[in-house]
Image: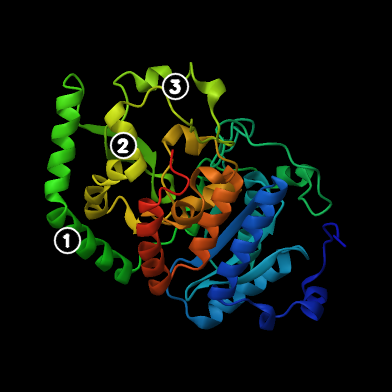
Amino acid sequence: MRLGLVRHSPARVEDFRSLRDLYTPRQMAGLLQRERARADRHEREFALVVLRLRNDAGEWSILRLARVLLDVARTTDEVGRYDDDAVACILPDTDAGGAWFFARRACSMARRRGLDPICTVYAYPSAWTPGEEDDRLSVGRRGPSRGKAPSADSFDSRLRDEIPPSDDQDVAPLAPMFVRPTPWWKRLIDVVAASCGVVVLSPVLLAVAALIKVTDPQGPVLFKQRRAGLGGKPFTIYKFRTMRTDAEAMKRQLAALNEQDGPAFKITNDPRVTPIGRFLRRTSLDELPQLFNVLKGDMSLVGPRPLPVEESDGCDRWHRRRLDVAPGLTCIWQVHGRSRVTFDEWARMDIRYIRRRRLWHDLSLLVQTIPAVLLRRGAK
């Protein structure tokens, strides 16, 4: 049962919340993931407030700062160590305005106890600045954040006027914290395998390029497109051109024929595809130039397939967990799904891969990709 915001004296809070209740940095990371999943499921917001001291004041001062957070926190908030020099509080069902009210109150109490903290507020999924609460930029869908049901645990908006906001109270997006850097072993495999692939397949690359130029001399050999990469950062993907030069202009006209649910766009027997392009798609030869994307570090050999930026922007919040890792040439969807599954199932496959990302799993998917391509499973 959710409890309302109740003001306790420090002595009474001590009775049921002590420094022994502090979570470790690893546990806090797990709690952030759990709260993110909950917020995505219910289309809610949450925030993270981090407090650190301005100088190396020692362990005792950090614990005193943690005591402040425990005294100010609601029963549904989670308090723990952010790192060796900072403490943090996760605030469920709290927008950035409520988080800054909490932060100002915590800093005020800390200063009364002789501490001088630096405060940082992170918000998920919206960015916020004082005075612009109706113009939030969603990290997921473009446009204003969806409204949330009132919560008994939310900070009373009338109390926010007690401590007016200052001009330097920025809010950092929380989403980048969930981005997972590419492990060294994965990057090593990418560079070695992609380099070998470019050398070994160079005759094929040249032959395909010549074939495209001979059959359609007016258009370029390579197709370049902006796609959403690690953390949603756009990058330019390279593919052999398989469509007419006016394919993008025709996309709106063909929108009614889209067979893939969700934001992705796929059509069986797409009229924009050239005759040679159909062969390249069936054999996945059109993907070979992405080996250069792998060498550049934009992509990995194994990872969620990158969507065009506009399609990625149209994803639901939970779909965007695909962006937590670098995109790849192949993944579970390439091996077991492709056009045979819904977009939600596609996203679940990618999220399942992210949770199980290990060396042997990557090698297994690379091996399974070969028969999937040769047998043209789900290819269009």
Is 348 in front, or is 73?
348
- Residue 236: x %, y % from top left: 29, 39
Q: Estimate the x, y position of residue 192 in percent, counting from the top left.
A: 20, 65
Residue 251: give its label: 3
Which residue in the structure is indicated by mark 2?
Answer: 279
Quadrant into which the C terminus falls: top left
Lateral position of residue 151 relative to residue 193, left or right? right
Measured from the top left, where is residue 289 in percent x and y? 23, 44
Q: Which mark is residue 143?
A: none
**Amino acid, disc 3:** Lys
Q: CA distance from mark 2 to mark 3?
A: 21 Å
Tell me the kind of residue under disc 2.
Phe
Mark 1: amino acid? Cys
72 lies above or below 156: below
Tell me, yes or no, if residue 134 can be seen here: yes
According to the picture, the residue beneath numbered tag 1 turns out to be 196
Query: Which of the colour schemes (rainbow, by chain, secondary structure, one colour) is used?
Result: rainbow
> What residue appears at the point 25 percent right and 68 percent down from the top-left corner?
188
